[in-house]
Image (cartoon, rainbow, N blue to C red):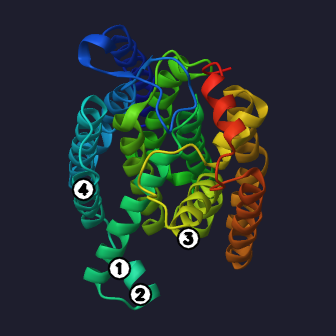
Amino acid sequence: MPTLGLILAAIAAVASFLTAWWIMRRAERLGLVQEPNARSSHATPTPTGGGLGIAVGGTIAGLLCALVLPFLGVPVIMASILIAYIGYTDDRRPLAARWRLGAQVLLMGAVVAVLPLGVVMALTGLPESVIMILLALGGALWINLYNFMDGIDGLAASEAIFLMLGGALIAVAFEPGITEDPRLWWMVGLASASLGFLLLNWPPAKLFMGDVGSTYLGLMTAFFALTTITSFWLSLWQWLILAALFLADSLTTLVRRVIRRERFWEAHKRHAYQALQRRFGSHRKVTLLYVAIDVVILLPLAWVAGRAPEWAPAIAVAVLVVLVLAALRAGAGAPLKPEAEEVSAGAKNGQ
């Protein structure tokens, strides 16, 4: 299975790149050119929708799981294709937020429905129906948080690669026998598909991901977190550590906007990563900073949380507190100053 999994991962990377390249070449004809707007950190019209390549590559990577574990793989693939289709439609012609959110909750609910929730029921004492509702709502929130974090070149795709490969490496370190499980190679394949797209999205980006890619990645990363937790590959605390940068940045910004009674669902450019991009004048520096924190700090801490599970909750909470404070210091959710607006509007895309 490892050999077949690696072959599918390589195919996923190539398919992702070719699909994204095709979208880039035909973006104007397809109505997939993103004009600078209130949320943009770029100043020139740029092709978008390239995340379709990730969805195509990720689906190819999931074929092995669909064959070996059809009760799990087939429903998840179907849900992921549907959420990618909704995202693609939204990239071409914006859909009402309530319809998008409703679809995300339903599709996340379909994913949750195929997972064995007995261990969650035993730990929480909650009925299965309540757990399913909470996980569907939590998954839909994560899908939107992931979408919020797709605002500068290379960031969202790099995070997907880190989450999938980081999660897979830690899982194999503690459970070597899972190399025969197709879900592991689906994770590797999704990372490969994200890499294929990243070749065109790395600063300065030639192509943006769009909602088709960010919502797809949000759903798929939520699925892999849940399925690895219920299979005892990783713990909830380890996943909170791995995803801590995106969680701290997005939630801090969201909460500050809610407290200020702002229309938090509308486009903006007030995340910590966007504030840092304006400060550094570079997409590349911010993306590399986030990748460095992921690999140098969060990945080792997630491994430590596996080695010392009794300390895992404390490590996760400490990491999130530190990163929330860092996000606040960077300016997450803070009102933009007029000079910052001018700098952002005049910045060159992807420097």
According to the picture, the residue beneath numbered tag 4 turns out to be 107
| x then y, percent, for residue 188 | 49, 37
**Observer-nearest of 109 and 308:** 109
Q: Using the numbered discs, state the Cα–Cα distance from disc 3 to disc 1 in whole angstroms.
A: 37 Å
According to the picture, the residue beneath numbered tag 2 turns out to be 122
**Observer-nearest of 114 and 108:** 108
Amino acid type indicated by mark 3: Ile
Mark closer to the chain start, 2 or 4: 4
Neighbour tally class for label 3: few under 14, some 14-19, many 20 plus, Cα within 10 Å: few
Q: Using the numbered discs, state the Cα–Cα distance from disc 4 to disc 1 in whole angstroms.
A: 21 Å
Q: Is residue 171 left or right of residue 214?
A: right
Neighbour tally class for label 2: few under 14, some 14-19, many 20 plus, Cα within 10 Å: few
Amino acid type indicated by mark 2: Ala
- Examine the rendering and report whether any part of residue 224 can be seen: no
Q: Mark on residue 118?
A: 1
Q: Are marks 2 and 1 in contact (CB under 8 Å)?
A: yes
Mark closer to the chain start, 4 or 1: 4
According to the picture, the residue beneath numbered tag 3 turns out to be 259
- For discs 3 and 2, the disc positioned in front in the rendered view: 3
Mark closer to the chain start, 3 or 1: 1
Neighbour tally class for label 1: few under 14, some 14-19, many 20 plus, Cα within 10 Å: few
Q: Are marks 3 and 1 in contact (CB under 8 Å)?
A: no
Q: Using the numbered discs, state the Cα–Cα distance from disc 2 to disc 1 in whole angstroms.
A: 6 Å
Relative to 240, say whether 300 is above or below. above
Q: Using the numbered discs, state the Cα–Cα distance from disc 4 to disc 3 in whole angstroms.
A: 29 Å
Q: Going 75% across and 46% down the picture, which residue do you hit?
A: 293
- For discs 3 and 1, the disc positioned in front in the rendered view: 3
Q: Is residue 339 left or right of residue 181?
A: right
Amino acid type indicated by mark 1: Gly
Q: Using the numbered discs, state the Cα–Cα distance from disc 2 to disc 4 in whole angstroms.
A: 25 Å
Q: Is residue 97 left or right of residue 185?
A: left
Q: Are marks 2 and 4 in contact (CB under 8 Å)?
A: no
